[in-house]
Image (cartoon, rainbow, N blue to C red):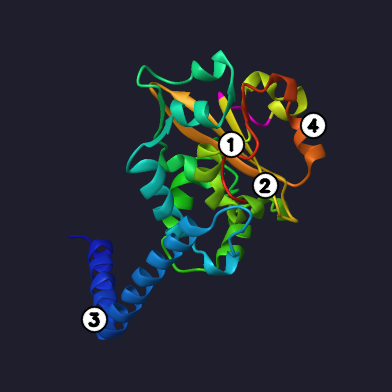
Amino acid sequence: MSNSEQSIEDKIREYNNQLEKLADCRSKINNLKKNKDKLVKQYIYNTEAPKILDIALLNYKALLFYFKDNFIKISLILKLTNYEKNGKLEDSFKNFFSNKQQVNIRSEFNNFPHLIGIKNEFHISGYMDKFMDGIFYETNLLEDYKKHNSEFHTRDIHKIKTFSWIIETLHNPTNAFKQSAIKKKASIKFKSDLIFARRIKNCSKYKWHIVGLKKIGRNFVIQSSYPIKTNGEFEKKFDLDKKIYEEMEGLTGSE
């Protein structure tokens, strides 16, 4: 065994000894973290539009576990009958639904960073690994967020604030569009096969919430999610004449 290998083993034993001395503290801290993360997940789940998430109450790990439980562990199922009951839909909207008249959404871990506004720079070697390795430590989310976003802009944080609206927007959209409805300038950055848009009432910060789905095989993944501040901005992004679903006013949701 080489000196370097022995040195590594000695260092590991040293860390083990130091951690063993803190065993009681570690146990208490881990239990606190587990209990807090459960509450944070419940807080995210309970927060519906027009309420927004308080960044100070969140941490990456709980956000990831919420995403895993709701979009990875099991399929999120959208049933065609729900939209037939609540709105007017074109045949091209129905075509996205399978023979069982449903859409299955099963996302992957690598969809998560982009959904909370982290720059998904796949061309950088090890980018995803570096991000995932770091999120399990208890840190200041906002400070960590700035570190992961080399070109940090305040607007990026809006994705986290409205992260809890994804399921609500998918189940009760105001409109739905295909990729072809995205206006040329906006389509450069936003590519999704099926887009759900929900009008947010009684909210001073945001007027719309957008969720984009991409079809991979038989299932869909959540490609993007973000809020839009004004009706004007919404109309600049989408050709409203090309909507393939429209909610019938007064039938869905309480906002």
**Which quadrant of the structure image shows residue 105?**
top left
> SS for tag 3?
helix
Estimate the x, y position of residue 8 in percent, counting from the top left: 28, 66
Kindly report which numbered mark, 4 or 1, lies closer to the viewer in this rendering. 1
Q: Nearer the viewer, mark 4 or mark 2?
A: 2
Three-letter residue code for mark 1: Pro
Q: Depth check: give the residue in front, 161 or 21.
A: 161
Q: Position of residue 93 (x, y in %)?
A: 54, 20
Element under disc 2:
loop
Determine the image quadrant of residue 51.
bottom right
As helix, strand or loop, the secondary structure at mark 1 comes to loop
Give me the disc on residue 203: none
Q: Which residues are magenta?
A: 189-193
Q: Which residue is mark 2?
A: 200
71 horizontally vs 85: left or right:
left
Residue 236 disc label: 4
